[in-house]
Structure formats: structure tokens, C-alpha cells
């Protein structure tokens, strides 16, 4: 996996238990426990040191709401 990947959150599946926010420091949490990506949107760019945590989050999300996909280019 390269640095140009992102953790995608499928909001239609997420149940806001917040487990992924415990694994990834780049994710905040709203008042209901749903993950928040800094800057908005549903894709968290995966930094090199977060690759393992992102893989763990995908594997552990109980509703399969997380996936890893190519990051969108920044402008
Ligand atoms: S682990 Fe899955 S269900 Fe839980 S908050 Fe994260 S994306 Fe949502």
C-alpha cells in the first residue's frame, strides 16, 4: 500500500460505535460517536505510519463500513 491511499467511510453502513477512531488519530468523533475526517468528507488520507492501523480498522469494523481506496488527488 502506498501513501496515496485513503480510508473510505461508507456512511450508509457506519453505526457510529467509534472503534476506528480509537485506532486512527486522524479521525475525530462527533457527539454521537460517528467518525469525523479532518477537513470534512468521507476519505481519510492514510499516512505511512497509519497503514497498519488502517488495515486493522477495515478488518475490525463490525459493519464493513471501511475500505481502502486510491486517494483523490489534491489541488
Ligand atoms: S468502526 Fe465502522 S461502524 Fe464503527 S464508527 Fe468506524 S466506520 Fe463506523
Image (cartoon, rainbow, N blue to C red):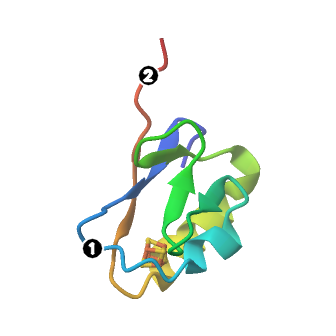
Residue in the image at 63% along x and 69% along y: 21
Question: In the structure shown, which secondary structural element does the residue marked by tag 2 occupy?
Answer: loop
Up/down of 69 relative to 73, above or below: below
Residue 35 marker? none
Residue in the image at 40% along x and 88% along y: 62
Q: Does the residue labelled 1 lie within 8 Å of ligand 1?
A: yes
Q: Where is residue 4 in the image (x, y as percent from the top left)?
A: 53, 35
Q: Where is residue 42 in the image (x, y as percent from the top left)?
A: 40, 48
Q: How many C-alpha atoms fall within 10 Å of the one at disc 1: few (<14), some, or many (≥20)?
A: few
Which picture quadrant has residue 72? top left
Question: In the structure shown, which secondary structural element does the residue marked by tag 1 occupy?
Answer: loop
Earlier residue among tags 2 and 1: 1
User: How many numbered circles are shown?
Assistant: 2
Q: Is mark 2 within 8 Å of ligand 1?
A: no
Residue 73 marker? 2
Q: Nearer the viewer, residue 58 or 37?
A: 37
- In the displayed structure, does residue 55 sit left or right of residue 61? right
Q: Which of 60 and 29 is in front in this view?
A: 29
Up/down of 35 relative to 17, above or below: above
User: What's the distance in space between the residues labelled 2 and 1, CA to CA?
Assistant: 25 Å
Residue with the most extreme left position: 12
Q: Mark 1 points at which residue?
A: 13
Amino acid at each position: 500500500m502506498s501513501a496515496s491511499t485513503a480510508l473510505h467511510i461508507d456512511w450508509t453502513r457506519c453505526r457510529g460505535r467509534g472503534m476506528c477512531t480509537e485506532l486512527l488519530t486522524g479521525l475525530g468523533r462527533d457527539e454521537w460517536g460517528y467518525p469525523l475526517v479532518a477537513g470534512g468528507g468521507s476519505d481519510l488520507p492514510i499516512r505511512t505510519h497509519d497503514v497498519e492501523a488502517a488495515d486493522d480498522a477495515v478488518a475490525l469494523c463490525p459493519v464493513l463500513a471501511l475500505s481502502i481506496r486510491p486517494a483523490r488527488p489534491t489541488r
